Image (tube, rainbow, N blue to C red):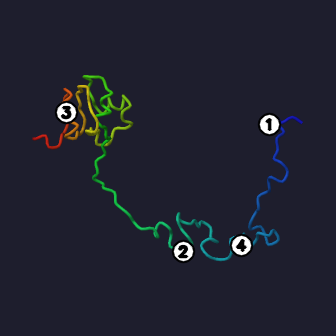
Amino acid sequence: MANELSNLKPSPGSTRSRMRVGRGEGSGKGKTAGRGTKGAQSRSGYSRRPGFEGGQMPLQRRLPKKGFTNIFAKDFEVVNVARLADLEAGSEVTAESLKAAGIISRIGKDGVKVLGRGELGVALHVRVSKLSRTAAEKILAAGGSVEGPVPGAGA
């Protein structure tokens, strides 16, 4: 007999018919329908809340609380000047151009911050949300220009 979609059936013993509960004492699952007697679990509409452990102190309450989330934290995507060395000389560096070049995968909620780790040998025009002082010094030393807040750069 060929295996075709029209004559497929489950192997013998692999399927069982559904137990119809609450259909008389003789059925083996009559009267309380396998729910036991009394209590919330025997009632219709009962649902146990997530994490409930039968009255035992649940795990999320047994574990200690740790740390906090600073709701005022700034979200910058960080780039070091060493990564900027791969860019073409004289090009303009913005958050969008860094993302297009594949140097960053996302633009942070507060933009991009350039940090000063590494060396820079090409002159670039950098226009980002924030720069570190060492990053600004290295960009300027390489003959480039910076636009954006630099800490300690004077008013």
The quarter of the rendered structure image containing the C terminus is top left
Q: Which residue corresponds to mark 4? A: 32
**What amino acid is found at the position of numbered circle 4 in the picture?**
Thr
Mark 2 packing: few (<14 Cα in 10 Å), some, or many (20+)? few
Q: Which residue corresponds to mark 1? A: 5
> What separation in Å lies between label 1 and label 3 (alpha carbons)?
69 Å
The quarter of the rendered structure image containing the N terminus is top right
Q: Residue 51, position in %: x, y?
A: 52, 65
Between 102 and 32, the one lying in front of the other is 102
Q: Nearer the viewer, mark 1 or mark 3?
A: 3
Q: Residue 37, position in %: x, y?
A: 67, 76
**What amino acid is found at the position of numbered circle 1 in the picture?**
Leu
Find residue 119 and report its image quarter: top left
Q: Secondary structure at mark 3?
A: strand
> What separation in Å lies between label 2 and label 3 (alpha carbons)?
61 Å
- Which numbered disc, 4 or 1, marks the residue that appears first in the sequence? 1
**What amino acid is found at the position of numbered circle 2 in the picture?**
Gly
Question: Which residue is painted at 18% across and 30% down in the image?
Answer: 141
- With respect to residue 65, does 102 lie above or below? above
Q: Residue 58, position in %: x, y?
A: 50, 69
